[in-house]
Amino acid sequence: MDDTTRNVRYELFQFYLRECRPPTVDELAKASSLPCVEIPPVLQQLEDSHHIVLYKHQSCAPTPVAMAHPFSHLPTPFVVSQGERSWWANCAWCAFGLAAMLSPLKTTVSVRSGSIGKEMQFNIENDKITCVSPQGEVDTNDCCVHFSVPPTTWWRDVRFACGTIHVFASKKEAEEWPQKRGFHAGDIMSLETAWLLSKAWYHDKHEHGYNRKSPSDVEELYTRLGMTSDFWKA
């Protein structure tokens, strides 16, 4: 990544953290001290290298940025809040990833689980997670995250892949969800492992020196977290 692309990526993430939304081309140009005409090709480079996802087909959106993982421009069932700021995240993994980025200060992840109708609020502070629902306290040891699509195919349709990563209050709910809702059964991960994965993947993504993990880095991380099934093979 050249210096210009790195700076634009950094300013995009910093804007998103401050304003809780993606910047317009004009706003990103001003933040990056670049002419507006230079922004679209840089954003295309960032999409080509899987740093962001751009709107397509002459979208009516005021911003070209649809996704900048962990952030989503469009509303989702995953809301991450800290103080007076709140953001939409693309999926359960992204939601906990944003919480990791915002740690160690208290962060709230509010979700409507894949089971539909079950609302859960995860409170994260000093690396500890608690969860409550309208029905009362939820045991986080029972919570898990279901992945329908293996990572080797995520970028064929990244919105679909993200849209199928959901958190559940129990393994039973996660096991029933794919057939009940018409998705592939994939991998079920404990909340503890999902939190460790989120921290490793996202904690520094807003920093200027951030680089995407290499295939060997990803393989080492997966192995360390016990993600060794064929589903996670690079």
Image (cartoon, grey):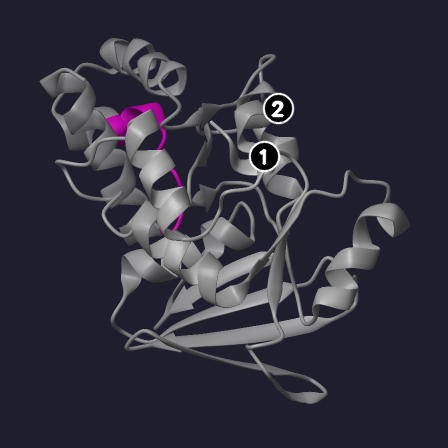
The magenta stretch spans residue 51: no
Query: In the image, which disc is placed on residue 95?
Result: none
Q: Is residue 143 visible?
A: yes
User: In the image, residue 110 lies at what x, y percent?
Assistant: 55, 68
Q: Quadrant of residue 1?
A: top left
* Residue 121 occupies quadrant: bottom right
Work out whether residue 170 or residue 30 is closer to the camera in this orientation and state it.
Answer: 170
Q: Amino acid at mark 1?
A: Asp
Task: Name the amino acid, label 2.
Answer: Asp
Q: Position of residue 3 (x, y in %)?
A: 10, 19
Q: Which mark is residue 157?
A: 2
- Placement of 68 over or under 90, stated as above or below: above
Nearer the N terminus, badge 1 or badge 2?
2
CA gap between label 1 and label 2 equals 20 Å
Number of numbered discs on residues: 2
Q: Residue furthest bottom?
A: 136
Name the residue rendered at 17%, 33% in the picture. 31
Residue, disc 1: 230
Residue 125 percent across, percent down from the top left: 33, 77
Under circle 2, the secondary element is: loop
At 41% from the left edge and 53% from the top edge, which residue is drawn?
225
Residue in the picture at 36% in, 27% down:
51
The residue lying toward the viewer, choosing from 84 and 142, is 142
Left or right of residue 27: residue 162? right
Which region is colored magenta?
A: 20-28
Q: Nearer the viewer, residue 20 or 218?
A: 218
Relative to 126, is 22 above or below?
above
Against 150, residue 64 (above or below) is: above
Horizontal and vertical percent position of residue 13:
28, 40
In the shown orientation, is residue 144 left or right of residue 104? right
Q: Is residue 26 magenta?
A: yes
